[in-house]
Amino acid sequence: MKRIFLLLTFLLSFVQMKADEGMWLMMLIKRLNGVDMQRQGLKLTPEEIYSVNNSSLKDAIVSFGGYCTGEIVSDQGLIFTNHHCGYDNIAAASTPEQDYLKNGFWAMKQKDEFNAKDLYVRFLIRMDDATQRINSKLNDTMTEEQRKAVIDREYKAIQTENSENGKYTVVVRDFFNGNEFYYFVYQDYKDVRLVGAPPSAIGKFGGDTDNWEWPRHTGDFAVFRVYADAKGNPAEYDPKNVPLKPKHHLPVSLKGIQPGDFSMIIGYPGRTNRYMTSYGINQLVTKDYPAWVEASNLAMQVMKKYMDRNKATQLNYASQYANVANYWKNRQGTIDAVIQNSTISEKEREENAFANWTLLPGNQDYVGILEEIKTYYQQVSQRNMERSYNIQIQINSKYITTPFQLGNLFKTYADQDMQNRIKMRPQLEEAINDFYNDFDAELEGEMLNSLVKLYQTKVNRDVASPTLMAQDASNLSLQAHSSIFANKASALNFMLNPDKVKLDADPLYRLSNAYVADQRALAKKFSLVESNFARNSRMLMEGYRKAFPERTFYPDANGTMRLTYGKVATLPQRADRSYKGITENFYTDMQGLVDKYKEGDEEFDLPKKVLDMHATRDYGIYADAAGYLPVNFLTDHDITGGNSGSPVIDAEGNLIGIAFDGNSEALSGDIVFEPKWQKTINVDIRFVMWTIDQYAGAKRIVDEMTFVTNEHPTPVKGSVLKAKKKR
């Protein structure tokens, strides 16, 4: 009896949950969080946040390219997101002679807005619950393969029923490890144009040194615009398209913020694993992430070597380098945070409570699940390490990926008669241009040699690609440079003189095809193990929800729109950290930015104009009431990758900032929420507007936006504020 009493007491300890924990599905806000949010200060109704029939906040939020979030901030389709989200597009617009990454870009007229090729934004139209529909067709006697076949069939049916003949994109996702299902109806717009970006000395200030650290002084924002046809429908890029008239846009608040102010973030968080077991976390931090860190660090060294030599290479690889560097520091920071925050021991406590619960009458279906999951991680430990090294090869070595993708097009092309080849040629030439758009043959040769050699050194042969293990890693670049796929010129030459025999004998084509075949064979080898793990993970999640019935469970992030709420917050100070450049520990200001300035430094240089404007306190209407110009601030929101660019919204639905980073103390946040340490770092919207208006002089952008101030509690156009300023 005493054991049961202690167990119940322990279970109740898991019921407590801070309101700022959780990434909540939009349609569930009213039922799960509406009252609590209003109690904390929200002045909107759930219907004003998410509505299918009326305009609401969700209509102003877009998935930006499928990897970030953006918000609509004018009635002419203007979008704010992060500088690092638009980095690739800014680099694409740049040339060695006109470097928009370094110098910034501002379209002073609409005709100057730059076509961001291949970029799209996605609006959520509605979502709905498909759990009962799908689960009613499943049963416990099915194998995982049978279960998957049923689910896939229902997915396709739901997509057909809701796409309206292709008008909408319909995505079905599973939640809670396959226990629930929801579908999402989206509308995609493919004509998106770059409107403005600050110089990297503002948009990327602090570089890798400050990344994931507080205090920050980074103007991490960029401005885009979405276009539509004359009727407001999605359309491919066309100079005749017009700015989209959105259903809703966010007014900008210049009122200022204080600790404790209610705030929320809506966006598209990518992936969390909050219900991962201690065994999975141990695998991540002792095996998988160290391998990732090692391989990505090597890839960065190779890129940096060639980027420092050549300006064009620097621009071509800037986005790839920044992405690899970001994840490199994230993975290492996660390892450190898991150790610092005793994450594994906390998970073990929860698992012990669950294991004891399974021994109570009626819970026998869940006995032994944790042990089976533990066995799974023992079985896949070396395989998962191989994946980490392998992912870095796929991400960073174009000489591995390009021959497979482009080579299959070449094979189809070579099989055609002359007439069909002529028809295919424009498409093939475009593909070649795309593949070799950002390409340095010397860099790629060394990248291939280096990553394959590391793979051979570190990966267990039992789980390795036989093809990669058999290569002479010091000689691969020589093979590459004699290949059809060596560079753009050699690829175009093959298009003009196709030869199937030559293609089949090409060293890179043979290497890439054999490598892909190896990966498929490895996946098949572990398919049964993975199927058993999927079933056990689903049952564990089902069991947890029964074991802790008073706990409000939220689904892991999976790339769907979520809302997280909390407040403007401070970060506890640590004795081992420097907090130079902050007055109070919830915001940073222009003085702190200038204090970090290092002339000529790659990460901490500043434009002279910024220094001059600070010297004269030329802050315009964007200064705080206390006189300083805010730069960044903290909130206690629960976000992850994919939330980059998400709007920080106040209690009345106004934009107060743009989320762009987390803090190193909580880099274990994808695995477990750390209420003491978990913070979101945001660009204060007043610094964004100061940069656009005062620094860049892009008045037309300000004119089309709407603002609220202490003097104007209801939204007014930017031109009204500027007129008042002139008086």
Image (tube, rainbow, N blue to C red):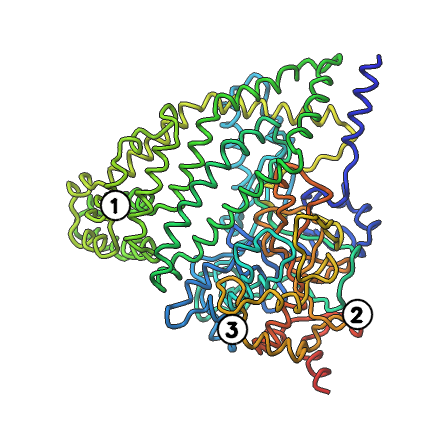
Q: Where does residue 456 sit, x and y in percent of width and height?
A: 34, 33
Amino acid type at circle 3 is Trp
Task: Identify the residue at image location x=27%, y=31%.
Answer: 470
Of the image marks 3 and 2, the number of the one nearer the N terminus: 3
Residue 713 marker: 2
Amino acid type at circle 1 is Ser
Q: Find disc 1 in the rendering and name its residue.
A: 477
Crowding near pointer 3: few (<14 within 10 Å), some, many (20+)? many
Say above or below: 378 vs 23. above
Say above or below: 228 vs 422. below
Q: Quadrant of residue 74?
A: bottom right
Question: Which quarter of the rendered picture does the N terminus lie within?
Answer: top right
How far is mark 3 from mark 2, CA to CA? 30 Å
Task: Identify the residue at image location x=52%, y=52%.
Answer: 167
Q: Secondary structure at mark 1?
A: helix
Q: Quadrant of residue 225?
A: bottom right
Q: Is residue 231 visible?
A: no
**Residue in the foreground of this view, choosing between 510 and 590:** 590
Q: Secondary structure at mark 2?
A: loop
Say above or below: 31 vs 523. below
Q: Find disc 3 in the rendering and name its residue.
A: 106
Crowding near pointer 1: few (<14 within 10 Å), some, many (20+)? many
Q: Secondary structure at mark 3?
A: strand
How far is mark 2 from mark 1, CA to CA? 64 Å
Residue contact at pointers 2 and 1, CB within 8 angstroms: no
Viewer-nearest of discs 2 and 1: 1
How far is mark 1 from mark 3, CA to CA? 41 Å
Viewer-nearest of discs 1 and 3: 1
Q: Where does residue 316 sit, x and y in percent of width and height?
A: 38, 59
Total marks shown come to 3
- Tell whether 694 sits left or right of 357: left
Of the image marks 2 and 1, the number of the one nearer the N terminus: 1
